[in-house]
Amino acid sequence: MAVKKSKIPELKIKLATATDFSKIFDFFFTHFVEKDPEGNFGEPADRRDLLEIIAHTGRAILQTNRVELTEGRVMCLPQYQFYHGGFQLNGHLGVFFYFEDIDKGALLLQKGPQSFFARISIRQISPPPAPPKN
């Protein structure tokens, strides 16, 4: 079955307004992952910044300073400014998607029987304050 790209704008709206991330990922899996289990829709993209944000978020989820991100894969549908992919953090499987135009995304990390959800963003809201001068 082919992925219905027409569902991408609907996913963006759900992401922007959602409070229950399990519903967002149910939609994502139903309309995208189940239609293309290999995650090949789109074209490969080199987005180390996304992978760095995923690793940073994973540190908080796993409550550790050391994470090893392996099998990080990023795919892109440029006409939608939409990125998605899969990864492993310290051996735990995860998936993510991200919309560049609204700088919002979400990730799901599976740790044993538990599912952890997080919202992700790349751009910093405001620069950090300058350190005080002594």
Image (cartoon, rainbow, N blue to C red):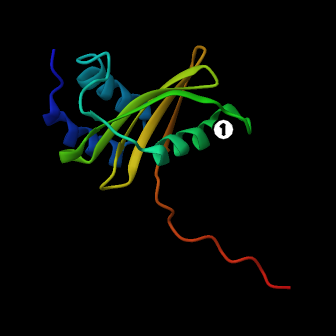
- Left or right of residue 67, residue 42 in this image: left
- Left or right of residue 2, residue 24 in this image: right
**Quadrant (top left, top right, bottom left, bottom right) of the C terminus:** bottom right
Mark 1 element type: helix
Is residue 27 placed above or below 13 in the rendered structure? above
Residue at (51% x, 62% y) in the render:
124
Residue at (46% x, 59% y) in the render:
123
Numbered circles on residues, count: 1
Neighbour tally class for label 1: few under 14, some 14-19, many 20 plus, Cα within 10 Å: some
Give the residue pinned by disc 1.
59
Is residue 85 placed above or below 129 in the rendered structure? above
**Nearest the eye: 85 or 13:** 85
**Nearest the eye: 68 or 107:** 68
**Nearest the eye: 47 or 113:** 47
Residue at (80% x, 85% y) in the render:
133
Residue 45 appears at what percent x and percent y?
Answer: 34, 39
Residue 68 appears at what percent x and percent y?
Answer: 64, 30
Residue 30 appears at what percent x and percent y?
Answer: 27, 21
Residue 32 appears at what percent x and percent y?
Answer: 26, 25
Amino acid type shown at disc 1: Arg
Q: Residue furthest right?
A: 134
**Quadrant (top left, top right, bottom left, bottom right) of the N terminus:** top left
Residue at (28% x, 24% y) in the render:
40
Q: Quadrant of residue 86?
A: top left
- Left or right of residue 92, residue 22 in this image: left
